């Protein structure tokens, strides 16, 4: 009989230990889930926000001259108001998830095509889906990696969504553009720009 009581007590202790370990494991999993939820999907454990070395709020956009898919020429001198600038890549899975959010954001914000730019970095053939889907709501630019707009905005991570605004300057075009937001979240309320 003493042997049976000892066995039942041992099983009870093992079950209690198992319960404590399971509760601790669930707590750790919740912490990790929260950390992963704050990371950009598909980019590993990077925190939300601009990539290291990327252009930041208050910094000047470098000089650029680019032609959109519909033939519109843009440069710092043509920026007349706050402009949303999104960088996507055809090979980027999170970019494909962000496109519908961007379309909803653009629709809700009422931005004109001149105040919303999408830069698709990659092969022109692979970029046609982005151009087709976004071309009605934004100026779409297609460029190779390291292209003029990517260099001007110091962007190499995708997706990246920025806001810029013109400021008086002393450059050759008499104008400079400054980043006003380096982490535009498309799931937040839209802003209305010029």
Image: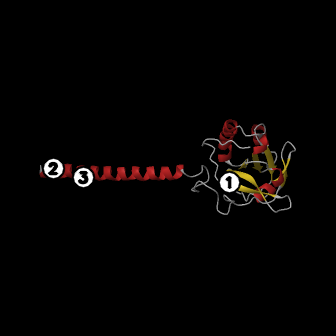
Query: Sequence-wise, which precedes: disc 2 or disc 1?
Result: 2
Between disc 1 and disc 3, the foreground one is 1
Query: Sequence-wise, which precedes: disc 3 or disc 2?
Result: 2
The answer to whether residue 21 is left or right of residue 153 is: left
Image coloring type: secondary structure
The quadrant in which the C terminus is found is: top right
Helix, strand or loop at label 1? It is strand
Contact flag, marks 3 and 2 (Cβ < 8 Å): no
Residue bearing the label numbered 2: 5
Which mark is on residue 13? 3
Residue 53 vs 104, above or below: the answer is below
Q: How many marks?
A: 3
Query: Sequence-wise, which precedes: disc 1 or disc 3?
Result: 3
What's the CA distance linking mark 2 and mark 1? 72 Å
Contact flag, marks 1 and 3 (Cβ < 8 Å): no
- Looking at the picture, how far across and down is residue 68, in whole percent? 83, 46
Residue 167 figure quarter: bottom right
- Looking at the picture, how far across and down is residue 98, in whole percent? 66, 43
The residue lying furthest to the front in this view is: 168
Residue 114 figure quarter: top right
What's the CA distance linking mark 3 and mark 2? 12 Å
Residue 192 vs 5, above or below: the answer is above
The residue lying furthest to the left in this view is: 1
Tell which of 65 and 120 is nearer to you.
Answer: 65
What's the CA distance linking mark 1 and mark 3? 60 Å
- Looking at the picture, how far across and down is residue 164, in whole percent? 72, 52
- Looking at the picture, how far across and down is residue 158, in whole percent? 68, 52
Between disc 2 and disc 1, the foreground one is 1
Tell which of 41 and 176 is nearer to you.
Answer: 176
Residue bearing the label numbered 1: 180
The answer to whether residue 170 is left or right of residue 157 is: right
Residue 189 figure quarter: top right
């Amino acid at each position: 009989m003493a042997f049976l009581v000892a066995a039942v007590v041992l099983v009870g202790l093992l079950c209690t230990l198992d319960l404590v370990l399971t509760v601790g494991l669930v707590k750790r999993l919740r912490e990790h889930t929260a950390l992963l939820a704050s990371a950009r999907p598909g980019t590993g454990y990077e925190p939300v926000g601009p990539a290291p070395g990327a252009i930041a709020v208050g910094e000047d956009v470098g000089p650029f001259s680019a032609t959109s898919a519909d033939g519109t020429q843009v440069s710092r001198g043509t920026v007349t108001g706050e402009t949303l600038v999104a960088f996507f890549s055809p090979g980027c899975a999170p970019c494909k998830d962000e496109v519908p959010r961007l379309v909803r954001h653009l629709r809700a914000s009422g931005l004109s095509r001149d105040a919303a730019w999408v830069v698709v970095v990659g092969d022109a053939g692979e970029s046609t889906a982005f151009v087709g889907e976004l071309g009605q709501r934004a100026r779409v630019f297609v460029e190779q990696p390291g292209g003029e707009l990517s260099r001007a905005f110091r962007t190499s991570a995708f997706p990246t969504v920025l806001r810029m605004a013109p400021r008086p300057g002393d450059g050759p075009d008499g104008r400079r553009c400054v980043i006003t937001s380096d982490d535009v979240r498309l799931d937040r309320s839209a802003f209305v720009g010029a």
